[in-house]
Image (spheres, rainbow, N blue to C red):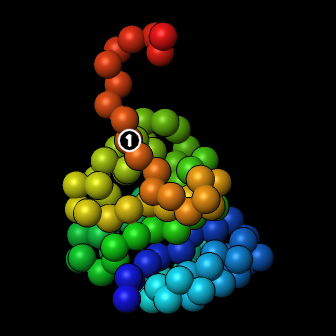
Amino acid sequence: YMNVVIYATSSKAADTIEAFAKEKEMQVIDTIINEDKLIEKLKWFIEREAIQAVLINSSLELARNKKDLRDFLEFAANHNVSVNSKEYNWMPIRVEPWDGGSGC
């Protein structure tokens, strides 16, 4: 089994993610809905090696800005925890190193 934590902004969204997790035979450790200190709570699970993945609807729900999102994704990756998003067909969100260029 893969242990996961689910985060959603509504009960309906949480139900959808939980159904996906059960279908894939994942063990849901916790479902978090609209948590002010979300990143801190997720880090608590990660630091204790309690989970292997975080399931979310959208990366935009995870952090208030790109820096916080990048920092959290790097933290999770450094602890071998994937952050999987419904918006990417449940694929892990990857942090790509920025080369300082303009994207061209």
Q: What is the quadrant of the N terminus in the image?
A: bottom left
| Residue in view at x 32 percent, y 31 percent | 97
| Residue in view at x 45 percent, y 68 percent | 54
Instruction: From the viewer's side, name the closer residue of 99 and 35.
Output: 99
User: Is residue 35 in view from this perspective?
Assistant: no
Image height of 64 relative to 49, above or below? above
| Residue in view at x 40 percent, y 70 percent | 53
Query: Alpha-carbon neighbours of circle 1 within 10 Å: few (<14), some, or many (≥20)?
Result: few
Name the amino acid, label 1: Val
Which residue position holds label 1? Answer: 95
Image height of 27 relative to 86, above or below? below
**Could you say where residue 13 lies in the image, as x and y percent from the top left?**
72, 71
Which quadrant of the figure has residue 35?
A: bottom right
**Could you say where residue 27 lies in the image, as x and y percent from the top left?**
45, 89
Which quadrant of the figure has residue 19?
A: bottom right
Q: Secondary structure beneath disc 1?
A: loop
Which quadrant of the figure has residue 33?
A: bottom right
Count of marks, rendered view:
1
**Could you say where residue 72 lies in the image, as x and y percent from the top left?**
37, 51
- Most extreme residue toward the right is 12
| Residue in view at x 23 percent, y 77 percent | 48
User: Is residue 79 in view from this perspective?
Assistant: yes
**Could you say where residue 55 lies in the image, as x and y percent from the top left?**
52, 68
Relative side of 51 to 93, left or right: left
